[in-house]
Image (cartoon, helix red, strand yellow):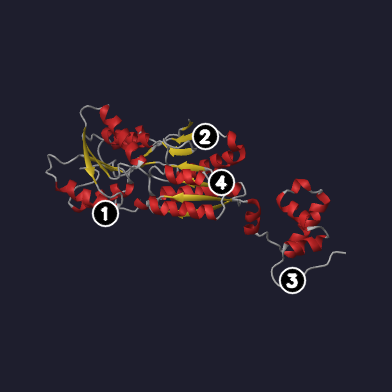
Amino acid sequence: MVQTPRRDGPPSVHHVAARAGVSLATVSNVLNHPERVAEATATKVRDAIDALGYTPNRNARALASGRTRSIGLVVSSLRNSLFTDMVTGAQTAARAEGSTLLVTNSDNDLEAQAEHLAFMESTRVSGILLASMTTSREQVEAVRQHGLPVVYVNYEPDDVDACSVIVDNEQAGYVAATHLIEQGCRRIAFVSARPDWQPVARRRVGLLRAVAEHPEVELIDVDAEDIDPPGGTDAGVRIAAMPPGQRPDGVLGVTDLLAMAVVTELRAAGIRVPEDIPVSGCDHNSVAWGGAVPLTSVTQHGEEMGAEAITLLLAELAEGPGHVHRTVVLGSELIARESTLGRARGAAAQAATKPSDPRRTEA
């Protein structure tokens, strides 16, 4: 006869074992290795769990196995909808696989990022998704030395052999610049900051490619000093103050927040957008969509990136040491809106730049 333990709190595995008339080891196997237990016995244990309302102690199971069913995601900035979309996609994909997602925000601070990675390790997550804007080799290597796989999101490492999923930021810069050229722009100001950030650098490469295809187009680099709206405000004031003959006739902001701030300052100075100066963003940040002039931008596929990153991480966990790292690249498509479509050529340009299906490749 199995003696029922005293009940002074929530039901425990001991209560389940007593109610089902089985050993603690059998209950543990039903919870962790059900394939080892006869179906009739497993049914008795599950019935006892349901009747008692027992919830497995995840922390205890983590201590026993060394890992939880959780996945960590460290993002650069939750102020950008790209990263909130990324969280949504990763969370949905993780949940579909029976895992939970833990999210932290480094706010573009490498020291904070290191602290968050250490926190993720302390919670015994199975692996980590890292959405960084720049190289994080030493931090990632430290984590991986402890047996944790790391998948980069929105960053393609060239100094670490790891899986990654990125959007084609070079293509993003190219299609945005090409669109402005199609609107008749011949003096394009590129408003940017943080050239050390990989997405920024690659968008500029795409812009330069578009300009190179049109020798009549001049590029004007405008250093915003700050990737957030204050930098765009300062850049917009400087552009508006230029003599009309030297002023750019098109603006490409490396981020939507920069571009929207430029739009605000140009309009405040009496310069019409887009009739006088079309303005485009480049990262499809919904935070910047609330201005007086809807902003042209380029898709970034944040949700798809998050979901793909989960797939890559789970594959690495399943395949173990034989896993081959790979990079998934998602395409970029222009979304043309009023900030560039007010000129006579706007309707034709809009038809020519209608979004296409995302390009997806693996390297």
Q: Nearer the viewer, mark 2 or mark 4?
A: 2
Q: Which of the 4 quarters of the picture holds residue 43?
A: bottom right
352 or 71: nearer the eye?
71
Amino acid at pointer 4: Ala
State which tag comes first along the sequence, 3 or 1: 3
Q: Which residue is mark 2?
A: 325
State which tag comes first along the sequence, 2 or 4: 4
- Vertical placement of 221 versus 81: above or below? above
Q: Which residue is mark 4?
A: 93
Q: Residue at x 53, y 52 (%)?
A: 121
Q: Are marks 2 and 1 in contact (CB under 8 Å)?
A: no
Q: Which residue is mark 3?
A: 7
How crowded pointer 2 is (Cα within 10 Å; few <14, some 14-19, many 20+) is rated as some
Q: Position of residue 37 (x, y in %)?
A: 79, 49
Instruction: Tell me how far mark 2 sits from mark 1, CA to CA.
Output: 39 Å
Instruction: Tell me how far mark 2 sits from mark 3, CA to CA.
Output: 50 Å
